[in-house]
Image (spheres, rainbow, N blue to C red):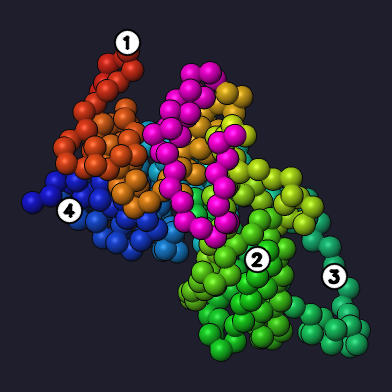
Amino acid sequence: MATAAELCRQANEQYVDEDYQRAVELYTEAIALDGGRDDIYCHRAQARIQLGKYSEAAADCDQAMKLNENNSKAYIKKGTALFQMDEIGKALDVFKEGQKRFESDSVYVGWIKKCEDKLPSPKAETESPKIPQPAPAEKAACASSPSAVRHEWYQTHTHVVVTVLAKNVKKDNLSVDVEDRKLNVLIKEYQGSPVDLNFFLAHTVVPQESQTKLFASKVEIKLKKSEGIQWPKLEGSAEEKESVTPLAAAPIPEGDVPKYPSSSHYTRDWDKLAAEVTKEEKDEKLDGDAGLNQFFQKLYADASDDTKKAMMKSFSESGGTVLSTNWSEVGSKPVEVKPPDGLEYKKWEC
C-alpha cells in the first residue's frame, strides 16, 4: 500500500502534467493516511485553485494554518483564492497578516498592491459624488456598449491561460477565435449587451491546440505556447516579438548550430545541456537563481516523456540534490542523495 509521501509524490507529478483533478484525488488520499501534514493541504489548495474551486482551496489553507501557523504558502494561497472569488477586502487582510508574519517574503508586497488597486480609495467613498443622469439618447448609447468584464491570465511552462470573469455564459452564446498572436473572445449577449475582448498576444501560440472551458463563474481559454519561454506580459506588439530571446537559453557555439527544417523532430544532448547549466551556476551568470530556474523550466518543457520521468524521479528520490535526464540510468534503481561538499542532508519529504 502506498504511503502518504508516495501518494503526494504521484500527485506532484500529475500537477506538473496539468492533470489537476487527479492531483487533488491523490492529495486527498495522502491526507487520509496522514492528516497532520500541512504541506499536503497547501499542495491540494494550489491544485484546487487551478480548477477554479476557490472556496475549497481557502478551506485547505485554513487547515494548513491550524496545523502550522508559520506556513507562509498557506497565507499566499488563501489570499489568492479569496482574490479570485472577488473578496478583495478579505484577501488584502490575509496578505497583510502574512506580510506581518513573514517580512522576508517579498511576494506579499505585489499582492497587497494588487488588492489595493482594485479597492475604491477612501476619498472616493467619503465624497460620494453625484453622477449626472444621462439624457434619453445617452441612455440608449450606454445600453449598446459592451459590458465591463474583467479578465486575468497566468502561465505554465507550456501554456498561457486567459480567464474571462463572466458568469453563466452559454456555449451557443460564446465565440472564441485564436490565431498565432491574436485572441478574440465574443459573448454575444451578457447582462443585456455584447462583450468583445481582443488581445494581440506578446508571443505566438498554436491555434489548433487551444482549448476553451466554460465554468459557472468564468470562461477559461488555454493557449499552447509555440516556444518554451516565460511571457513577461500577456499582450505585446509585432515589434516587441522580434527582440525577444527565450529566457535562460544555453548559448550554442556558432559551428555547432544544427541544420534541420523548423518542423523536424530532433534530439538534444541533455547531458551536455545539464553540464552547461552546472557551468553557468559555477560561473555565477548575471541572471542568478532566477535565470537558472528559467533554464530548468525550458529544459523540462522541451523534454521527452522519459527525460521528464528521469528528472522527476531523480530530483524527488535524492531530496533535490540530483537532477538526471537519463531514464535508463535512474529508472531501474533508487537515486542516492548527494549533497554538496561541506553540507549535511536533512530528509524532507514531498
The numbered dot on residue 32 is 4
Decide: is 184 above or below 202.
below
CA separation in Å, label 2 and label 1: 50 Å
Residue to which mark 1 is pinned: 342
The residue at the point 26 percent across, 46 percent down is 9
Residue to which mark 2 is pinned: 180
Please name which of the two marks, 2 or 1, marks the residue nearer to the observer: 2
The numbered dot on residue 131 is 3
CA separation in Å, label 2 and label 4: 45 Å
Q: Position of residue 258 (x, y in %)?
A: 55, 44
Q: Position of residue 16 (x, y in %)?
A: 38, 51
The numbered dot on residue 319 is none
User: From where the camera sits, is residue 44 visible?
Assistant: no
Q: Position of residue 187 (x, y in %)?
A: 64, 81
**Looking at the rendering, which quadrant does residue 269 occupy?**
top left
59 vs 9, left or right, is right
Instruction: Work out whether residue 60 or residue 232 is closer to the camera in this orientation and state it.
Output: 232
Q: Earlier in the sequence, mark 2 or mark 3?
A: 3
Which quadrant would the C terminus be assigned to in this image? top left
Q: Earlier in the sequence, mark 2 or mark 1?
A: 2
Instruction: Work out whether residue 113 or residue 344 is closer to the camera in this orientation and state it.
Output: 344
The residue at the point 52 percent across, 39 percent down is 294
**Span colored in magenta:** 255-284
CA separation in Å, label 2 and label 3: 43 Å
CA separation in Å, label 4 and label 3: 56 Å
Which three-letter amino acid code belongs to the residue tagged 3? Answer: Ile
- State yes or no: residue 338 in magenta: no
